Amino acid sequence: GAVVSQHPSRVICKSGTSVKIECRSLDFQATTMFWYRQFPKQSLMLMATSNEGSKATYEQGVEKDKFLINHASLTLSTLTVTSAHPEDSSFYICSARGRRPGYNEQFFGPGTRLTVL
Amino acid sequence: AQSVSQHNHHVILSEAASLELGCNYSYGGTVNLFWYVQYPGQHLQLLLKYFSGDPLVKGIKGFEAEFIKSKFSFNLRKPSVQWSDTAEYFCAVNAGNNNDMRFGAGTRLTVKP
């Protein structure tokens, strides 16, 4: 149980285009979803936290107009990178937390590698 | 703000050697502690976690960690590493009533066959 999927796993886009990444909790209801980015050989940095049905809370330094997060249902959150630029190239990872199986535990998706040309 | 420090950036061991990776955090309240592993090209996997109770926590694949509250530490140990343990290891801390999970910088472990 507690499986989180992400789609796509890899995306290459041109500079200036927008990219949407989906994060789904497959077998539990995710009351909270988290979005992280990971640069090569670095740790995960929390970008934003979203609770189902409410606006996302962004970490300091993360542009909310550039990284649009929608958490419309208890099983789906999306991250849209708008007007992507090469510096947005990174590995984006989502995680989800629900009331079950463990409230304080986050379950991570496999990540999406974004390359902006 | 809570922070997590992993002191070892890259550890190189031979097979059968013992492993200890350091993790210290700065937060005064109740914390939940985690160790994750990321194998090359794969996603994060939970190795073990501590919420409460016995401070010595046993996880998967022979790993264990000890929570020492007085030292704000949660070091990861394994008595005898294998080549397949080569991976990146991340310590993470989540404050008791907080959404945030903060990750350490990670420690890359290379096990030589």
Image (spheres, coloured by chain):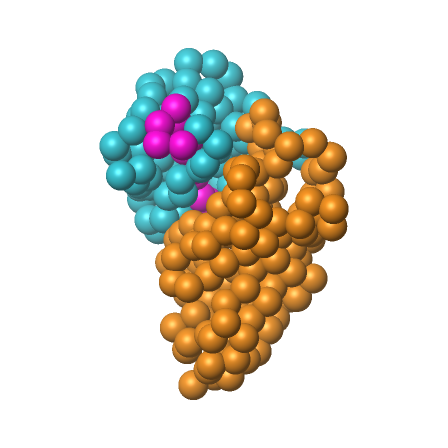
Chain colours: A cyan, B orange
Pick the front one: B97 or A39 = B97
Question: What residue do we see at 38% from left, 62% from top?
Answer: B61
Q: Is residue A26 left or right of residue B74?
A: left
Q: Which residue is outermost to the front?
A: B54
User: Is residue A57 shown to the viewer in this render?
Assistant: yes
Residue visible at 40% across and 47% down in the picture: A111
Q: Nearer the viewer, residue B47 or A18?
A: B47
B48 displayed left or right of B99: left
Q: In terms of depth relative to the viewer, which is nearer, A109 or B75? A: B75
Q: Quadrant of the C terminus of chain B?
A: bottom left
Residue range (magenta): A88-102
Give the camera-side residue of A19 and B104.
B104
The image position of residue B65, as x and y in percent, is 54, 56
Return the x and y of residue A19 as percentages of the image width and height: 40, 37
Q: Position of residue A34 (x, y in %)?
A: 48, 33
Q: Quadrant of residue B101?
A: top right
Q: Residue A39 in magenta?
A: no
Quarter where residue A28 is shown = top left
Residue visible at 27% across and 39% down in the picture? A1
Q: Is residue A115 shown to the viewer in this render?
A: no
Number of residue marks: 0
Judged left or right of residue B60, residue B106 is right
Quarter of the figure that contains the N terminus of chain B: top right
Residue displayed at 58% across by 25% down: B97
Residue located farthest toward the top when viewing the structure as drawn: A53
Task: Say above or below: A43 vs B96.
Answer: below
* Percent of width and height locating residue A18: 42, 35
